[in-house]
Amino acid sequence: MGGTADTAASGEDDDGAPLGGAGLPRDDADGPPDDVVLAVRLMYAGAGLAALLGLLRVIDPDAFRDALASSGDTGTMSSDSQLAGYVTFAIFTAGVWLLIAWGCRRGGRWYRAAGTAFGTLYVTTTVVALFQVELNVATVASVLMAAVAAAVLWLLWRPESSRWFAAGGRSGENRR
């Protein structure tokens, strides 16, 4: 009758069913699998990092202006306009992270697809930008956010996550 210490340590009960917290059987009908829960938490962290990037630019606008001046490519916009655009983009990015987290938590396939596109685009542009910008706090935060995006992508496409999204946010037993 009850699981042994060996089965609890393996993460499965005597019948091979996955265990949740405290060694109790996990009820998948109550929510998404662990990989999706972790991905959503990482998306919240990504939103926080995006907001931090915008805040760093507001706190120290001279660092942004210096980076623009050293690049030599200021274009036709003033540095204040470019700064405002950057901060607006950072806030928008934080909002996108939160929206995708909300949809993925509910098992929305389109949200996973949008998160995949968003994460892939962010990782790609960050890698390209690394060869064009100087190393500073904002660059480090951006690299951290790209690492978060890569982890989210991996978690959203794991087999357990794929089953969750294929079922439209329901466990396999509740599929209709």
Image (tube, rainbow, N blue to C red):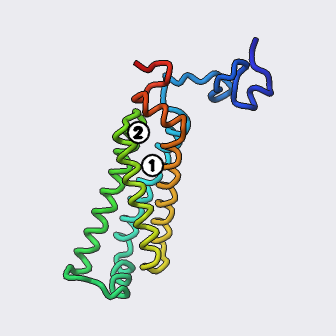
Secondary structure category for the residue under label 1: helix
Q: Do the numbered discs 1 and 2 sit on residues whose CB atoms are within 8 Å?
A: yes
Instruction: Please give left or right for residue 162 compared with residue 74 in the image.
Output: right
Residue 110 is situated, as x and y percent measured from the top left of the image, at: 34, 40
Rate crowding at label 1 as few (under 14), some (14 to 19) or many (20 or more) other CA atoms within 10 Å: many
Q: Residue at x 50, y 39 (%)?
A: 36
Secondary structure category for the residue under label 2: helix
- Image height check: is 54 above or below 167? below
- Image height check: is 29 above or below 80? above
- Image height check: is 47 above or below 167? below
Q: Residue furthest left?
A: 76
Residue 159 is situated, as x and y percent measured from the top left of the image, at: 54, 37
Callout in the foreground (1, 2): 2
Q: Please name whichever residue, 24 or 33, is drawn nearer the observer in this view of the structure.
A: 33
Residue 88 is situated, as x and y percent measured from the top left of the image, at: 27, 63
Q: Residue furthest top?
A: 1
Q: Residue at x 44, y 48 (%)?
A: 44
Q: Residue at x 48, y 28 (%)?
A: 31
Residue 43: image tag? 1
Q: Which amino acid, by three-letter code, is at mark 1? A: Met
Residue 136 is situated, as x and y percent measured from the top left of the image, at: 48, 76
Q: Quadrant of residue 75?
A: bottom left
Query: Of the residues under marks 1 and 2, which one precedes in the sequence?
Result: 1
Q: Please name whichever residue, 160 or 72, is drawn nearer the observer in this view of the structure.
A: 160
Residue matched to label 2: 104
Instruction: Please give left or right for residue 111 compared with residue 162 in the image.
Output: left
Q: Residue at x 53, y 24 (%)?
A: 28
Quadrant in which the N terminus is drawn: top right
